[in-house]
Image (cartoon, helix red, strand yellow):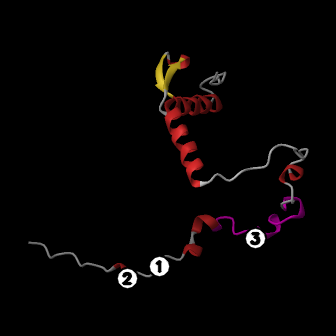
Amino acid sequence: MPPAPEKVSVAEKPPADVTADPYGHMADLDSREHFDLPEQRMDDDPALQQGLEACEGKPAVKLNDNAFRRVIENFERKMTTEFYYPPEEKTITYADALVAQAGMYRKVIEGALRVYQPLILK
């Protein structure tokens, strides 16, 4: 009968030194000069930072708990609703359609499909 393996307590193992990761230091370059450049700093208005015109639209709102719950419930109900999905020629849920659309987009990027067919909602 072989001897029982020794049990090593988790507390006895020293924590891994994450700064010794060889993959993070493959080029051994000092990249500090590439960060926090003036043109990379955030502007007070994100639209101006991206070169967009300031929008006069409605401001964002924070929903109270009950309203947030209702939004989530309705979103979940929508995602489980079935409809006829022409690319697969069958009835699927909206959640499955999102997965199928992502798969189609990937095929276009990889070159397996030439044209992306968007999901058009009525």
Eye-nearest disc, 1 or 3? 1
The residue where tag 3 is placed is 30
Q: Nearer the viewer, residue 113 or 58?
A: 58
- Taking the spot 37% from the left edge, 82% from the top edge, the residue there is 11
First in sequence, mark 2 or 3: give its number. Answer: 2
The CA distance from mark 2 to mark 3 is: 35 Å
- In the picture, measured across the screen, residue 34 lies left or right of residue 93, that is right
The CA distance from mark 1 to mark 3 is: 26 Å
Question: Dot 3: what SS?
Answer: loop
Q: Nearer the viewer, residue 118 or 36?
A: 118
- Taking the spot 83% from the left edge, 53% from the top edge, the residue there is 46
The residue where tag 1 is placed is 15
CA neighbours of label 1 inside 10 A, class few (<14), some (14 to 19), many (20+): few
Question: What's the magenta region?
Answer: 25-41
The amino acid pointed to by label 3 is Asp
- Taking the spot 64% from the left edge, 65% from the top edge, the residue there is 26
Would you place residue 50 above or below residue 95 in this image?
below
CA neighbours of label 2 inside 10 A, class few (<14), some (14 to 19), many (20+): few
The residue where tag 2 is placed is 11
Q: Are marks 2 and 1 in contact (CB under 8 Å)?
A: no
> The N terminus is located in which quarter?
bottom left
Q: Position of residue 86 (x, y in %)?
A: 55, 16
Asked if the magenta segment contains residue 40, the reply would be: yes
